[in-house]
Image (cartoon, rainbow, N blue to C red):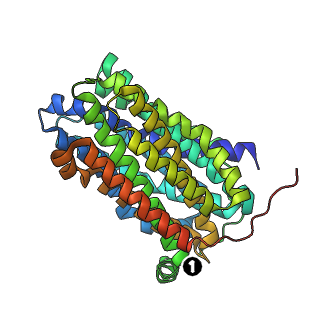
């Protein structure tokens, strides 16, 4: 597997998640800066997720005609513009608007990169490159939250987004240089030809199960890592922006666990690996109910590792489950994935007001149990080539 390709895929994933979730550590800061209820700041997360979900089903159709690398690099070149405008926002509503615009560029990075992975590799290499991409998203998600918290405490939240605009532009230049042009891409004649594949994808039970895994994974990670900020910012913990950003160091466990899990999936199968990851996630969610900061952080670390394993498995399975028009299948997956994330930011709000953190944990456990039943039933394993030695 090409090292240049691996690094390019890693940076493409990192660029999306660097920008997408950085605001999670800043929600209490936004509430104070704009004098709005804390719950309303959750829309700064939901807005880009909704934008991605709305656009993602059609990104595959555009990509099927235009190619992969040019769309990935082009979207990465556009993303710094709304990121800089976020830094200049004069109200929460304006900030939410520019966050939505950020989200409109992201599926052209996320979905097309996943299609690139599924198209340019086979069998074990697909699982490994999907794992590399997932590690990139983990790193971006951690770095965005960690850097946002510390830069905000030192120089204010506006400086945070100005810095992210610069970093995204640098990542774009690196991907343009490193990522090899696709070799197996075959353009379709029209958008209509690509869109006609939707009916086939939506009757493919293995794909639908994969969409459910993606929905569940992002629903849980957004629900958990959004509302835990409110929990940890309140007494008795009272954590500030830098401390909340530092909590996201737990994401780094995912960078360790994901490559291990992808190797296990090659040997043991995706369903067994998914079931193990779900069991770890449920146990870790229970651990966060212990009223001790160390126990909560340990639980969050295990949750992050388990959920990112689920994401890597789902991404790697799309290319296997889709019979044709794989980028369109990826687009539908991304739409379900980000609908899950958008709902994860707002559905737990009522439970938060009614039952606090335990209510959010109960909801996440329920979603995890449902998805493992679905995936176990419909993720039929296909033979996977295991390299000698």
Q: Position of residue 270 (x, y in %)?
A: 63, 61
In the drawing, does residue 250 fall left or right of residue 269? left
Look at 54% across and 51% down and name the residue there. Answer: 277
Q: Position of residue 117 (x, y in %)?
A: 64, 57
In the drawing, does residue 328 fall left or right of residue 291? right
Total tally of numbered discs in the picture: 1
Q: Position of residue 368 (x, y in %)?
A: 42, 57
Q: Position of residue 45 (x, y in %)?
A: 31, 46
Q: State the image quarter where residue 21 is shown.
A: top left
Mark 1 closeness class: few <14, some 14–19, many ≥20 residues within 10 Å: few
In the drawing, does residue 224 fall left or right of residue 62? left
Look at 46% across and 79% down and name the residue there. Answer: 202
Q: Is residue 20 visible?
A: no
Secondary structure beneath dot 1 equals loop
Look at 48% across and 56% down and name the residue there. Answer: 108
List the single residue furthest toward the top.
Answer: 154
In the rendered image of this protein, does residue 381 appear above or below residue 40?
Answer: below
In the drawing, does residue 48 fall left or right of residue 111? left
Residue beneath label 1, please?
A: 189
Q: Is residue 151 visible?
A: yes
């Amino acid at each position: 597997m090409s090292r240049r390709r691996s690094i390019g895929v890693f940076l493409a994933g990192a660029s999306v998640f660097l920008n997408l979730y950085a605001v999670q550590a800043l929600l209490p800061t936004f509430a104070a800066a704009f004098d709005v209820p804390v719950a309303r700041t959750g829309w700064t997360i939901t807005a880009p997720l909704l934008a991605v979900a709305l656009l993602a089903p059609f990104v595959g159709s555009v990509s099927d005609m235009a190619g992969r690398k040019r769309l990935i690099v082009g979207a990465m070149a556009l993303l710094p513009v709304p990121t800089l405008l976020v830094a200049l926002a004069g109200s929460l509503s304006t900030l939410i608007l520019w966050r939505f615009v950020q989200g409109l560029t992201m599926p052209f990075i996320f979905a097309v990169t996943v299609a690139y992975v599924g198209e340019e590799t086979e069998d074990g290499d697909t699982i490994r490159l999907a794992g590399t991409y997932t590690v990139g998203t983990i790193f971006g998600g951690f770095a965005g939250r960690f850097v946002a918290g510390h830069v905000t405490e030192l120089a204010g939240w506006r400086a945070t987004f100005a810095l992210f605009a610069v970093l995204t532009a640098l990542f774009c230049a690196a991907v343009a240089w490193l990522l090899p042009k696709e070799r197996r891409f075959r353009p379709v004649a029209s958008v209509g030809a690509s869109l006609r594949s939707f009916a086939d994808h939506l009757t493919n039970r293995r794909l639908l199960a994969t969409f459910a895994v993606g929905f569940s994974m992002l629903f849980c990670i957004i629900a958990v890592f959004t509302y835990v900020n409110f929990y940890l910012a309140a007494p008795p913990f009272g954590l500030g922006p830098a401390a909340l950003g530092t909590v996201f160091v737990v994401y780094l466990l995912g960078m360790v666990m994901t490559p291990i899990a992808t190797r296990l999936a090659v040997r043991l199968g995706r369903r067994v690996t998914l079931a193990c990851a779900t069991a770890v996630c449920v146990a870790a969610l229970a651990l966060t109910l212990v009223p001790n900061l160390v126990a909560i952080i340990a639980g969050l670390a295990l949750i992050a590792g388990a959920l990112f394993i689920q994401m890597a498995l789902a991404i790697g399975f799309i290319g296997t489950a889709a019979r044709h028009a794989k980028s369109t299948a990826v687009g539908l997956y991304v739409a379900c994935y980000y609908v899950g994330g958008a709902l994860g930011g707002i559905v737990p709000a009522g439970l938060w007001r009614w039952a606090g953190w335990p209510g959010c944990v109960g909801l996440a456990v329920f979603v995890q149990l449902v998805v493992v039943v679905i995936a176990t039933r419909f993720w039929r394993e296909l033979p996977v080539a295991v390299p000698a030695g």
